Image (tube, grey):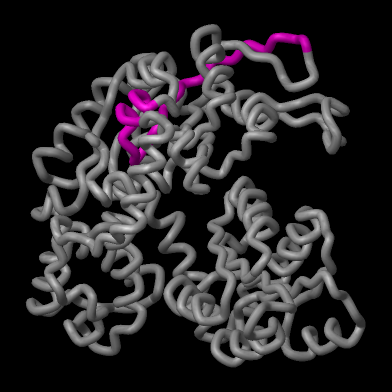
Amino acid sequence: MIYMKSILIIEDDLTFSHLLKVWFTKKNYIVRTTTNFSDAKKRIFEELPEVVICDLRLPKVNGITILEWIKSKYPDIVVIMMTGYADIQSAVTSIKLGAYDYISKPFNPEELFDKINEASKQKTPQKESKKKEKITDKISTVNESNFEKNYIKGSSKAYQQLYDFVDLVAPTNLIVLIRGESGVGKEHVARMIHEKSKYASGPFVTVDCGVISKELAASDFFGHIKGAFTGAIDNKTGYFMSANKGTLFLDEIGNLPVNIQVQLLRVLQENKFKQVGSEKEIEVDIRIITATNEDVDFAVNNGYFRGDLYHRISEFIIDVPSLRDSKNDIQLYLRHFLKVSNSVLKKNILDYTPEALDILTEYEWPGNIRELKNIVCRLTLIATGDYITKEIIPDHFRSKLSKKIALPINEEEKLRIENALRISINNIPKAASILGIDTKTLFVKLKLYDLLNG
């Protein structure tokens, strides 16, 4: 079993960085990327990644300097250095300064994966004697398994309706579309449906449609046979075969490449497909659940999500409420995750002071339950007394931020977007192409500049 789950990639080659992120995400790692030392320090402090993969040559601060800083502050983080300019001296220097290993570009991601596996096997409980190592391990546990195993139900009317809908739809074969903001727990709702369905004894396979490349999407979903294309050195199963007799959860379905939307629709209608390079049809028996935080209706109306696929995946829709729409549940979640964090971090924080509780209750929680879970873990870790006090709460929580507060408007950018929409006759994909951005980014900006109905 792989011990390490969170990775920070520090790399100024954005294409290569994205390639690594996609590859490791498919291996079920939590992956963050950055291009500079300043942002890397912030991410390491806030997220405590278990592995840092750092390029040796960066624009302003070289990798050796970053390695020295990491090892002085967080000696138990595994650091693997990489470079396209391999030489004996830099390798020796990196190892002497505490790098676990050193890899030369170009390389196959499998090589890097093997090195991380080796590091995970060496990071045994007997060797984790220092406090920081234990903390790093336990924070990872809070972020992953404990959130799944110690879920608590909200008590608001919106949540109660959600649970009623889950109980209602779970025994059926209807395809469910779960809608909600980022961080509200859409995947957990999908798992609840799976566990209450006839497929509960089968696998639950999660696919993040936002990281699937157009070129490899068909292979990722349906698999391929050896020799089907250049690089297909072995047979590949694919998500659909992996989920057979179980549930396939398609997260961020709105980001699915258009060419795969057609193939997905066909599979949903016929329950069978062909692997890339094969003429043999494979029949599967799976439950499909999808989720999105985007306005799919808008995507359909503007031509970058197929209407026929949308109607197929939305046979039953469940809306997951945001925390700000169920404020009465915030204190319930705060105390629940305090209990979880106490258990995992081996601490005994009794509660929040009234002032701290007021600040956290009034906060808007734009990141919803995920953000709340993370901040409670952090506060539990750094608290020195019996209570979480207002003094250790980050400053931005003290301002009663409102979702209605207007963001600063960039009039020049707004004008460029309006022109692109005019030129493309309101075709979103074409407008995004003109602007040199992806459709998801354009959609965010359309909401920001109130151009959705323009």
Is residue 296 inside the magenta stretch?
A: yes
Q: Is residue 402 left or right of residue 46?
A: left
Vertical arrangement, residue 104 with respect to residue 284, above or below: below
Q: Nearer the viewer, residue 414 or 129?
A: 414
Q: How many marks?
A: 0
**Image coords of residue 127 (percent x, y):** 65, 79
The residue at the point 32 percent across, 16 percent down is: 315
Q: Nearer the viewer, residue 417 or 174?
A: 417
**Image coords of residue 103 (percent x, y):** 82, 69
The residue at the point 84 percent across, 68 percent down is: 104
**Image coords of residue 210 (percent x, y):** 51, 42
The residue at the point 67 percent across, 12 percent down is: 282
Q: Is residue 51 left or right of residue 412?
A: right
**Image coords of residue 160 (percent x, y):** 15, 36
Quarter of the image that includes the C terminus: top left
Q: Nearer the viewer, residue 171 or 394?
A: 394
The residue at the point 75 percent across, 31 percent down is: 236
The furthest residue to the right? 88
Is residue 33 inside the magenta stretch?
A: no
The furthest residue to the top? 270
Part of the protein shown in magenta = 279-302
Q: Is residue 322 left or right of residue 251?
A: left
Q: Nearer the viewer, residue 237 or 428?
A: 428
Quarter of the image that includes the N terminus: bottom right
* Quadrant in which residue 78 is drawn: bottom right
Vertical arrangement, residue 163 with respect to residue 143, above or below: above
Vertical arrangement, residue 409 with respect to residue 135, above or below: above
The reply to whether residue 334 is in sight is: yes
